[in-house]
Image (cartoon, rainbow, N blue to C red):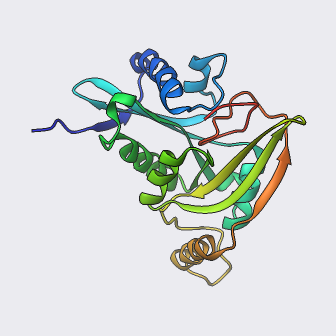
Amino acid sequence: MVTPVIVRQRGEADIDACVEMALAVHERDGYPLYLPTDLHAFVVSADALAAWGAERSGEILGHVALHRRSAAPILAVAGKVLRQPPSRLGVVARLFVSPSAHRSGAGRALLDVASRDAAARGLWPILDVATGLHAAIAMYEKCGWKRIGELTVRFGEDTSLDEFVYRGPVSLKVSSCPVGVPPELGARRAVSRAQSVNIPKFDVGGPWPETHDGMADEILPKCG
């Protein structure tokens, strides 16, 4: 019988393994797109509301975090489509899975836990992903994530990064509904808007913080 993958809160003892895994993922899959100088700080962000690890038989297979924020252009795109202020958005970030654990279900399990945690906090789960990360994009869409925007981030005159913005599949009880509209109905209307809206495309310039990962957070001269 195959040992199941378990998702749990990331502990201090997991960090070194997660840092090594992030390096292996970068070398094999190109995420993060630009390798941060400090991988430890990349994995352990002060901006994280929570972080989880996926494990099987005691071995760490993957990692994900939920962040308070992303780059301003990402939050602007998501906020405009979902009609939510930045404080009501939860950014799924630092999602990576060991090359040896592809197709194990760890990525989907981590994505599900992070998005549900955001919903439980009253936050709309969102993420951003470089348009060239096709495997990650396919997984998001199979898991019910909806593309709500596209933008090009420019770093100086010669470098740019094309990204998609996604919102998670979890419907929230939106407390900021118009008077007389039940929260459940307001949530359904917001989800409907995100599904039917014409995907906007933006072109924004840097520079951005060195923590962007081109997959689910800020935008840097970068990451993935």
**Nearest to the observer: residue 107 or residue 76:** 107
> Residue drawn 76% across and 55% down?
76
Q: Point out residue 171 in the picture as x, y percentages from the top left corner.
A: 49, 66
Q: Position of residue 139 (x, y in %)?
A: 44, 51
x, y percentage for residue 82?
66, 66
Quarter of the image for residue 159 reads top right
Q: Residue furthest right?
A: 157
Give the residue displayed 60% in from the left and 82% down from the top: 181
Please state which of residues 184 and 4 is positioned toward the viewer in this rendering.
4
Q: Residue placed at 69% from the left, 51% from the top? A: 87
Residue toward you, 6 or 156: 156
Left or right? Give the position of 100 relative to 35: left
Q: Is residue 165 left or right of residue 207?
A: left
Specify the quadrant that holds the N terminus. Answer: top left
**In the picture shown, does residue 107 fall above or below 198?**
above
Q: In the figure, residue 206 lies in which quadrant?
A: top right
Query: In the rendered view, would you say 173 is above or below 67?
Result: below
122 over 111 or under it: above or below: below
